[in-house]
Image (tube, rainbow, N blue to C red):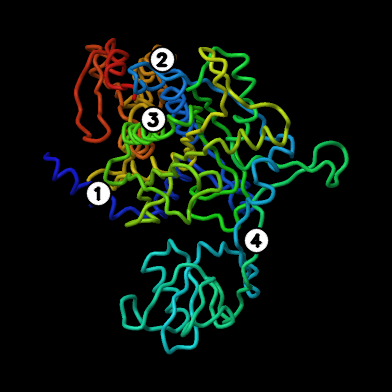
Amino acid sequence: MSVAQEKTSAEIANSVKDMKDIVALCKRRGFVFPASDIYGGLNGFWDYGPLGVELKNNLRDLWWKWMVTCPPVGPDGQPVDIVGIDSSIIQNPKTWEASGHVGGFSDPMVDCRETKLRYRADHLSIIYWIGETFAVAIFDDWDEDTIAKRLKKLGVSKKIGDAGYTRIQGIQVAGAGQPGLDRTYGPDAKEIGTLTEPKQFNLMFHTFVGATGGDDNKAYLRPETAQGIFLNFKNVLDSSRVRVPFGIAQVGKAFRNEVNPRNFIFRSREFEQMEMEWFCHPSEAKMWRDFWFAERQKFWTAIGLVSENVRMRDHDKDELSHYAKEGLGTADIEYRFPFTAPGFGELEGIAHRCNFDLTQHQKHSGVKMEYTDPMDPKNKFIPDVIEPAAGLTRGVLALLCEAYTPDPNRPSGVYLNLHPALAPKKAAILPLTAKDQHPVIATKLYMDIRNEFAVDLDIKQNIGKRYARQDEIGTPYCFTIDDQTVSDQTVTVRERNTMSQERIGLDHVAEYLRKHIRSV
């Protein structure tokens, strides 16, 4: 198949993907469940099932390998130096004062008096018609069909593209010829004028440390993993044989009280991050920023996200974080999710944080954060920081969306085209029947290779249904034990994507998997 044909097939497959189907498969096959499902769930929280946790751990471990145990080769031709930590979820509250989260980690919010729902103002747009007396507030990521359904409910017959139709980003926009919020329908409201003026809302979850409550015992669940790295900058320098430039990596959970969690696990209140802070001399910041821009794109394409669905986008000036405004800026690695198509959603950010964080913690703690060059003690400086920060749970979602491949030519109607290194199960061992020597041989094979590979021993149901299940969970290879196995000690290997089959020796199964389950 030519490259052009491959792109056409990928575009066709992507065009028929529906998030409802992906979410349904995730629950049916044990990837992701709503948290507290038996009680109706809790908005913004998710549980990862038997296969979901394996997929997530595989992605985490590959990221750790690329960053810490086998880091990339730097511009000088030598491997870069990165170490790992695992910091506490709850830190001294002064941490978040110094970082700016207590005073500035907030978003403009609007409430709907009718539905009692709250929305981020910067995630809403206004649709209005010149000459008409009302507007409609919608979410920025709504596609045209969703917008049309919303307008139809309100009795609006105009279609997108009709004369007089305008879409304005941000509900705070107001001007001549535009209705104000008092003449605006909320995204879910039936009545007009129910939206309040935007107010700032802090996104951090707070808790209390100790036996008594009150402001004196108030603490926060971390909204990002980065600050735990900055707090340990001196500890790592003093205890490890690292020298600037070097990095500190961390994987862990973070918590944000998102007002409007949505799009499955894309925007949730509890999530996991994979972050690395790269400490370098300010004069080398641009070189290292460009280096990490390239390296992080390599990672995502290497694990299976095709180039057409991945892009790098520089932040506009109005998007820059407070720490980046005087620096080299931030770029996002974005993925074309089904709910953002044809647009993209953020997967990872690579930011130049300047020396903001270390300077702030030096100021608030009184502890010097300067680095002294061992080759030149007179050369003291606070390092600049380049931060590649990826969403682990968003990465899982991107992999699931990319791998979900409808195929009407197979019983399951779909398969997950996961990279073998990421697949929760590398192989399935399937006795053709549950009697005689078939399950005996299958069990022995399973016991022989399970220490080396994550394999599934599946004895129940007919072989077609078992193939369908393995297709849906992304298992690359199935080994079937049948009567011929009993007579000549060979098994049938079925490849997931092509469904092609071949016979190999029973004693060659482990070698076959070593050859085909390649690392990334």
Mark positioned earlier in the residue sequence (3 or 2): 3
Q: Quick one: label 4, few (<14), some, or many (20+) residues within 10 Å?
A: some
Name the mark on residue 391: none
Percent x, y of residue 235 = 64, 20
Image position of 427 with respect to 37: above or below: above
Residue topped by disc 4: 200
User: Is there any visible trace of residue 462 in the rendered image?
Assistant: no
Percent x, y of residue 117 = 62, 66
Mark positioned earlier in the residue sequence (3 or 4): 4
Residue topped by disc 2: 452
Would residue 218 be found to the left or right of residue 450 on screen? right
Q: What amino acid type is highlighted by mark number 1? A: Pro
Percent x, y of residue 102 = 69, 48
The residue tagged with tag 2: helix, strand or loop? loop
Residue 461 or residue 144, whichever sits in front: 144
Residue 118 or residue 322, whichever sits in front: 322
Q: What amino acid type is highlighted by mark number 2? A: Glu
Mark 3 vs mark 4, CA separation in Å: 41 Å
